[in-house]
Image (tube, grey):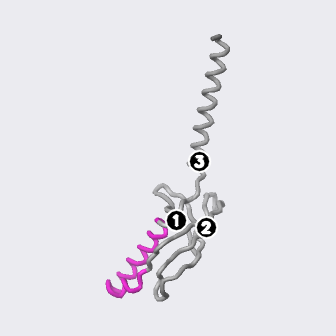
Amino acid sequence: MSVTNVETKVKTLFTGITIVLLGLALTGCSGEPTEADLKKALQAEMDRANELAQTMLGNEAGAAVATTIHTLDKLKCKQSEVDGKQEYRCKVEMDITYPPAKRQKRQASIRMVKEDNGWMIVKSF
């Protein structure tokens, strides 16, 4: 095998490795929140609200008005930038018990940003 063939094969190998690594790096940076990420972030918000209700109303009354997310389905997410920060506006459908209403399915839009400790809700409506 000639030196030129070896050099060509080494260049091809390094080019392939570079493309793979670049692809992995870009995938990690640009990924939108998963359905599990959305549910985890929304559940954390609901848990805080439920704890506040129990603190203000007492354990029994607070439990009676607690919000419960039974299921959450991600419908779509759209990437945007607000104040120089990447965020996603995600539309979801939830099966939720939200007193005083009974259990129901409803759609909501949630703004999400990725922080050092994971996905956080910016605003839901």
- Mark number, residue 89: none
N-terminal of the two: label 3 or label 2? 3
Circle 3 is placed at which residue position? 27
Residue at position x 44%, y 77% in the image: 68
Tell me which corner region of the image, top left, top right, bottom left or bottom right, holds residue 4: top right
Between residue 93 and residue 87, name the one nearer to us.
93
Q: In this view, does 19 lie above or below 96?
A: above
Circle 1 is placed at which residue position? 38
Image: magenta residue range = 40-66
Residue type (three-letter) at the residue carrying disc 3:
Thr
Question: Where does the N terminus fall, quadrant-wise?
Answer: top right
Tell me which corner region of the image, top left, top right, bottom left or bottom right, holds residue 53: bottom left
Where is residue 55 drawn, in percent x and y?
35, 81
Tell me which corner region of the image, top left, top right, bottom left or bottom right, holds residue 57: bottom left
Q: Does the magenta stretch include residue 99?
A: no
Question: Whole-Å distance between the Cαs marked 3 and 1?
Answer: 18 Å
Residue type (three-letter) at the residue carrying disc 2:
Leu
Crowd tier of the residue under label 1, counting other residues whose Cα lies within 10 Å: few below 14, some 14–19, many 20 or above: many
Residue type (three-letter) at the residue carrying disc 1:
Leu
N-terminal of the two: label 2 or label 1? 1
Label 3: state its secondary structure: helix
Residue at position x 58%, y 38% in the image: 21
Residue at position x 46%, y 65% in the image: 40
- Mark number, residue 75: 2
Crowd tier of the residue under label 3, counting other residues whose Cα lies within 10 Å: few below 14, some 14–19, many 20 or above: few
Predominant SS of the magenta segment: helix
Q: Nearer the viewer, mark 2 or mark 1?
A: 2
Q: Does the magenta stretch include residue 45?
A: yes
Between residue 65 and residue 36, name the one nearer to us.
36
Could you tell whether 2 is left or right of 59 in the image?
A: right
Q: Is residue 102 above or below residue 96?
A: below
